[in-house]
Each structure stands twice: as structure tokens, then as C-alpha cells.
Image (cartoon, rainbow, N blue to C red):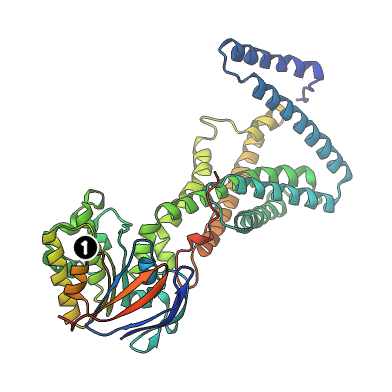
Amino acid sequence: MLTVSGLHSAILKPASFTVGAGECVAVRGPSGGGKSALLRAVADLDPGRGDVRLNGVAREAMPAPQWRRRVVYVAAESGWWADRVGDHMADPAAAVRLAAALGLPADCPDWPVARLSTGERQRLALVRALVLRPPVLLLDEPTGPLDAGSTTLVEECLRAELARGAAVLLVTHDPAQAERLAVRTLYVEAGRVVADGEVRPCR
Amino acid sequence: MPLISLGIPDLMLAASLLLVNGAISLALALRLERPLAVAAVRMVVQLAIVGLVLERIFALGSPWLTLGVALAMALFAGQEIMARQERRLAGPWTYGLGTAPMVFAATLVLILALSTAVRPDPWWDPRYAIPMLGMILGNAMSGVSLALNALTVAAWRERAAVEARLALGAGRWEAMRTLHRQALRTGLMPIINAMAATGLVSLPGMMTGQILAGVAPAEAVRYQILIMFLIAGATGLAVLAATLAAVARLTDSRHRLRLDRLAPPRG
């Protein structure tokens, strides 16, 4: 589904890997090693070279915004451009359903962004990406600041995404989370991306 | 009404007022006496030189000399834009992005005014062209430098918000729209405020000067209104062109935010 070959940038050494439909691949490694840079390069948010394809179609074949609606990057620290949560959601009805699955109340679209807690921000940033129903999700520590209960809800939600056929590239510091969700792991250290063999079958 | 000419003794008398300021500074230990003296001397020397230069230029009446002076003014204004940026674009971009739109807008507006409303003979008569260009450039310069500074500072500070929009599939113009709009407002606010307050709070310098020189107030007011419109038109055009170019330079054709194109902040 997502095939990456020879992707490199100012930070990344050439990386090649694939993520199949319904597969989750964990990305692990020390802080500052280039995990976020890898995700950003795949999303084409940083200038990079190499061949990146979705179902055989090169990203250069489409305008960058179209690519990024299909290969959605969710940053570890979310940015917000409007005052109200709901103004960030492409599909408000779907957003409420997804937010409920992540333990957020139905009136959350009306919340002011300024009053969100770190955990609420994190989950709502995931929601606004999921409403696009993208074939590929690039998630940068989606459960980093979350408590155990919210983490479980997010992981259930990600399993549902995998079940519908999404490909997920998941940066995580938690080896147990990688174990629970991922079929393979990529190690990123000093800009080098090293594929690690099969961990276990999906789900 | 004849112009009351000022002699050197008249100026000396006025300069003695600075001694009062100096005395206050010494008495209150403000340590402003040196900067005050330096600024006063600079003002006198700079204006004396400008007076001599303008006198020569008006006397010679050469179109090429007039053009040369206009260009020199524009390049100085561009330098001033550069100097007022907290985060400038790397390389010659800030200078180019600031100067080119300002020169373009000021030239357009000035030629429009000289060929329609004012119509001196010849149309490039330095007695009209140079002071009017000075006023237009000065204001366009302020607008452009404020707007560019607002844009680059906001792009740096709000990069997470801009990139969030890009990551969700927005195009670069959409992602930068809020920032661009803010920059435009920042650049245009001074001239809007100036127009709104003119006459009530401040009597514009040019109009006051014309009245002192013996021009009827109604006539001076018409000149001032013309100049304000020229300034507003030129500032609006220059700010729009400069910010559009800066948004384009801060992003790329693959709709990425390119903060790597900003020079490191100045220590």
C-alpha cells in the first residue's frame, strides 16, 4: 500500500520500507534520532528525495495537499488555527462520533481550544485527522501524554482504523504499545532507518 | 502673503531651547544630553546637505539626475525595511521582497499623480517629483516593513498551526491565510489611523508647511488630501505585493512551510 524507497532528507539517510493495508508499523528509537523527520518526510512536509507511493501512485503525480489528505501526519504537539475546536473538523458529525469513542463528550466541538488539556488536545488532533478517513495515518506519539484509560481508547480506535484497511506508521516510546499494535518495527537512530523483522502477525 | 524668511540668528534662538532640554537631562541625571546633542547636530547637517542638494537638482533640472536621486531614495528605503526585521528571509530576499514592491507601487502612484492631478511641466519636475516620492516612499516603507515583520514573526511563532493545516491537506495560501491577513492589517493600520486622525489630532507637516509658505489653507488642504490618497494607494499596493511574495517565499510549490528560508534571529 505505502511503499517508500530511498527516501532521504537533510536529516534522514535513505530509508526503504512498506506498510500494507491494515498494517501498523511501529517507529522506535532515541529522542532526536529522526522519527518525526521520517513521518514528516513521508507526508512531504519537509523537502526530501526518493520514491514514495500510495497503491503504486507516486506522490509527485498529485498536488501535495491531495497527498496529505491521504497520508495524514498527526504531530506530537498539535497546532490549532481557530478558537473553537469544531472549526478544525472537516466533518463535524463524524468528529462527534469519533470523539465519543475516545471518551470526549458530544459538546466538545464547541470547546475553546485555549482551554483544552494536553490530553484533550492530543485526542482531538487525532479526531480531526481521522474524520478525513485517510488510507495512511502517520502518528507521532498519539498516546504520549495520555493516561492509561485514554490510551486504551485510542488503541481501540486505531484497531478499528486498521480493520477498515488503514495503514498506520506509529511513533511510540512504549515497547508494549508497539507489541500490542504493530506487525513490524522500524528503528530510527541518527537519521538511519533500520527495519526489524516480523514481530508477530497483526492483531 | 510673502514668505517670512529665516536667518541664522532665528535658528540659533530656537536651538537655545535644546539647552533647556540639556539642562533638564543633567539635573535629573537622564544621561540624554549626549544623544540629544548628537541627534540635533545630525539633523542640522543632514537637512543642510539635503537643502543644498535639492537646490542644485532643482537648478539643473535634469531628468537623469532626478531619476538617480529617486533611485537612491528607494534603495535607502529598502535598507531601512531590512533593518526593521526581527526575522528576515535568508539571502537577498527580504531586501528584494521589500524594495521591489515599494518601488513599483510608489512609481505607479507617483506617475499617475504627476500625469493627471498635479501636471507640472515637465512632468518629472524634481520640485514636485522628489518631495512627493519622499512622502510616498516613507509611508510605503513603514507599511511594508511592519507587514513583513508581522508575517515572518507569526510564521515562526504559529508554525504548528500552519503545519497542522498543511498536514490535513490545506494548500499553502489557505494555511497561511490568517497570518497573511494579519500582516496586511498590520501594514495598513498606520495609514488608516493617519487618515482618520488627520486634521483633528495632527495637522500634517506638508500642509502646515504650505500654509506657512503663504498658500491659502483651502489649497493646502486639497494638496494634503491628494497626498494622503497617493500614500494610501501606494502603501496598500506595496504591502499586498510584498506580503504575497513573502508568503510564496515562506512556502514552496509542494505546499510546505519553509522556515529554513528564514535567517537565524539576530542576537
- Numbered marks: total: 1
Q: Is residue B226 above or below residue A102?
A: above
The answer to which of A52 and A17 lies nearer the viewer is A17
Identify the subunit bearing mark 1: A
Mark 1 Cα shell of 10 Å, populated few (<14), some (14-19), many (≥20) = many
Relative to residue B209, is residue B3 drawn left or right?
right
Quarter of the image for residue A155 reads bottom left
Q: Which residue is mark 1?
A: A143
Q: Residue furthest bottom?
A: A56
Instruction: Give the residue displayed 20% in from the left and 56% down from the top.
Output: A119
At label 1, the amino acid type is: Thr
Question: In x, y percent, where is residue A200?
Answer: 19, 82
Q: If the image is split into quadrants, where does the C terminus of chain B sit?
A: top right
Question: In x, y percent, where is residue A92?
Answer: 20, 66
Question: In x, y percent, where is residue A35?
Answer: 35, 68
The answer to which of B235 and A57 lies nearer the viewer is A57
Instruction: Give the residue displayed 14% in from the left and 61% down from the top.
Output: A150
Relative to residue B257, is residue A68 drawn left or right?
left
Residue A106 visible in the snapshot: no
Relative to residue A198, is residue A38 drawn left or right?
right
Q: Is residue B131 above or below residue A16?
A: above
Residue B85 visible in the snapshot: yes
Q: If the image is split into quadrants, where does the N terminus of chain B sit?
A: top right
